[in-house]
Amino acid sequence: MEKIRYFDHAATTATKEEVLKEMLPYFSIHYGNASSIYSIGRKSRKAVEEAREKVGKAIGATAKEIYFTACGSESDNLAIKGVAYANREKGNHIITSKIEHPAVLNTCKTLEKQGFTVTYLNVDQDGIISLDELKEAITEKTILISIMFANNEVGTIQPIKEIGAIAKSHNIYFHTDAVQAIGNVKIDVQELNIDLLSMSAHKFYGPKGMGALYVKTGVKLERIQDGGHQEKNKRAGTENVAGIVGIGKAIELAYQNFDAYNQKLTELRDYYISQVEEKIPYIKVNGHRTKRLPGNANISFRFIEGESLLLILDGKGICASSGSACTSGSLEPSHVLLAIGLPHEVAHGSLRTTFGEENTKEDVDFLVETLVEAVAKLRNMSPLYEDFIKTK
């Protein structure tokens, strides 16, 4: 069996041993309900609050501003719908971008059906919004700006501090989906004027099924889920104590080892891109060259289908992606790649590789060697490539 080489860390990561070890007692030994008043319940509550402290500390927030959820998508839903419902009297206008995660885009579409209006900002060829277009989109009814911190497909990092300043100057709440940024970017929500921030543990070596939402003190947020009074009456449901312990430990580890980890990812990413550019013609690197996540490389290979390429890579034990894990089952090209101006046929031939701590330079060399052979094979089967060569 081929060795598995995993290059899809934007989709998910393995839970670290240190994280799992800290979680395990809360499945069977310290199993008390964190909302109970007896001793084993108090033990669970203490663990929950310690994790809340860790998550808050990692992003420059206080513990009381952290709310635990089941995932990044739930955090996005709670942030956007919660602000929209709580601030109807002030206005009904929301601003977002065309390259957001489906958790944001589909939430906005739902709100449009409920009488809210949404402006979807364009992005340039690198995937960055225009601050001037953002300013022009603001009206007296604008109550929320929701722009992702870093894109999950092309890795582009938005001018978050500038967006936060614009929102603050107009007394508008600013939410950012930071699911891809946590652990890869240093974040201080106070300095960046962020009012709400979403995250998901499994993107930074924590457990799946565990997310968090930062809500700045004073933000008007309505609960969107009926039930009990957990999470300060904002998110009903018995606390997932083991998962909460896991996200706390994972985010703590992510920022303890931040500089070395991200320097390694940057070096692997840049080496990979340089090797592909040198050895494979007719390619395009998508996203901003420098304002991007350290481990993200999205490259379009002309004259091939991304799905066919993924199958060949999988046969060699290589895990990569043709786009977001939440949309990879679709036959439509990535909405992100179309938004940055790629034609359909080029967008269909894109490959996203996202590096992690277990990857090595030797792994990258193997990936590039496999890509050289696979791309050549697929192009030799392509009538489009044949016609292109004849016209040269």
Image (spheres, helix red, strand yellow):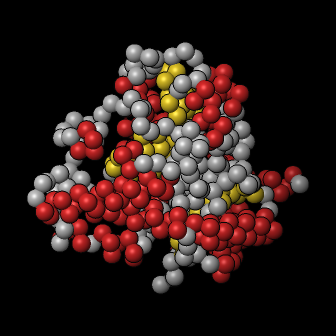
Q: Nearer the viewer, residue 104 or 279?
A: 104
Q: Residue at x 30, y 34 (%)?
A: 223
Q: How many marks?
A: 0
In-image side of 43 versus 84 (left or right) = left
In this view, the residue in front, 5 or 374, is 5
Q: Position of residue 287 (x, y in %)?
A: 69, 50
Q: Quadrant of residue 266?
A: bottom right
Quarter of the rendering occupied by the C terminus = bottom right
The answer to which image quadrant residue 335 occupies is top right
In front of the other: 351 or 380: 351
Which residue appears at 30% of the width and 69% of the height? 23
| Spot occupied by residue 149 in the image (x, y as percentages of width and height) | 57, 46
Horizontal side of residue 114 vs 234, given as left or right: right
Write the residue at 18% across / 59% down.
Answer: 42
- Report if residue 193 is visible in the image: yes
Q: Residue furthest right?
A: 392
Side (left or right) of 88 relative to 194: left
The residue closer to the viewer here, 296 or 85, is: 85
Q: Position of residue 84 (x, y in %)?
A: 41, 26
For residue 189, above or below residue 266: above
Determine the residue positioned at 62% across, 53% down. 155
- Residue extending farthest to the left is 38
Residue 21, relative to residue 72: is it above or below?
below
The picture places residue 160, in percent across and down from the top left corner, at 62, 42
Judge whether residue 312 can be spotted in this image. no
